[in-house]
Image: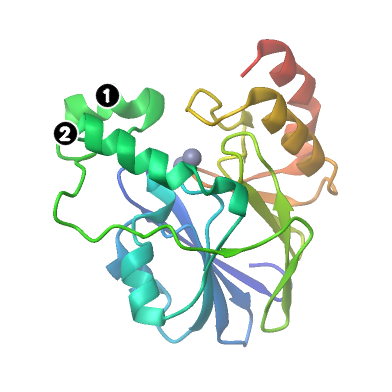
Amino acid sequence: MSGGLVLKRVVVGVLATNCWILHARGDRRALVVDPGDEPGRILAAARGLDVVAVLLTHAHFDHVLAVPDLAAAWRVPVLAHPADAPVWPHEVAAARRAGHWDAGTATAELLARDPASLAFPAGAVLWDGAVTPVADGEILRVGPLEVRMLHTPGHTPGGVSLAVDGHLLTGDTLFPGGPGLTGPPLSDFPAIIRSVRRLLDLPGTTRVHPGHGPDTTVAAERPHLESWVARGW
Ligand SMILES: [Zn+2]
Ligand SMILES: [Zn+2]
């Protein structure tokens, strides 16, 4: 929490995705970002709030699996950048072929530890992929909060980061120690570097909340940008 912002983290799913629930202190209207799995826990965490929308930083399976259940419970729009439209169909097609979700470089280890952990849910209701498009620079109002959309492609073509009240939700675009993976299909390293450069132009005190793992700040990461460019990942 800082200022008027309440930012609640719910860690969900096999890849320990950070699902975020944000609202202004003293206001019930809330935005839910990246409901990656475990809809029951997200519903419980949002109890007492009036969820106005779900927003996806991108459409990888580990950020969207709870969307159908939550959209049915809350009857709210699912916001995402339209350039990510190919990502979810690609995720589903790859999972159908392989019999499990593709977790990138973590796949082999996860399957070795627990073959069921990435299981493609044969009979389950999958998200239909329908979104309400958001655009770069758009301001989404959540009660008194102004949440600014930043199109930050590279990890996926339609990745977005959210800037609100000195905080930045970066999805899988920026983590402590570098940009997100650009090995997956539809990823692009030069594009993610352009996106990260733009994010690191924000004030140094900006708190960065990635899609997995711990937080960082713009000031902590900015000095390392050129070394990430040089290493190429
Ligand atoms: Zn991702
Ligand atoms: Zn992820």
Could you say where residue 200 lies in the image, as x and y percent from the top left? Answer: 79, 39
Residue 109 numbered mark, or none: 1
Which residue is located at x 76 percent, y 52 percent?
A: 206
x and y percent of residue 6 in the render?
A: 61, 72
Residue 194 sits in quarter = top right
Confirm whether residue 170 shows in the render.
no
Gap between marks 2 and 1 measured at Cα: 9 Å
Residue 102 can be seen, yes or no: yes
In terms of depth relative to the viewer, which is nearer, 42 or 188? 188
Q: SS for tag 1?
A: helix
The answer to which quarter of the image holds residue 109 is top left
- Colour option used: rainbow
Crowding at dot 1, Cα within 10 Å, few <14 / some 14-19 / many 20+, comes out as few
Report the residue at 62% width, 27% height from top: 188
The residue at which mark 2 appears reads as 114
Comes first in the chain, label 2 or label 1: 1
Q: Residue at x 73, y 18 (%)?
A: 229
Mark 2 is surrounded, within 10 Å at the Cα level, by few (under 14), some (14 to 19) or many (20 or more) other residues, namely few
Residue 44 position, x and y percent, is 34, 75
In contact (CB < 8 Å): disc 2 and disc 1: no
Q: Quadrant of the C terminus?
A: top right
- Give the structural element (helix, strand or loop) at label 2: loop
**Which residue sits at x=16%, y=34%?**
114
The relative height of residue 52 versus residue 164 in the rendered view (above or below) is: below
Under mark 2, the amino acid is Asp
Splitting the image into 4 quarters, where does residue 226 fall?
Answer: top right
Indicate the position of residue 113 as horizontal and vertical percent values: 18, 29
In this rendered view, identify the residue nearer to me: 230 or 27.
230
The quarter of the image holding the N terminus is bottom right
Compared with residue 225, is residue 220 higher up or lower down, i.e. above or below? below
> Mark 1: which amino acid?
Glu
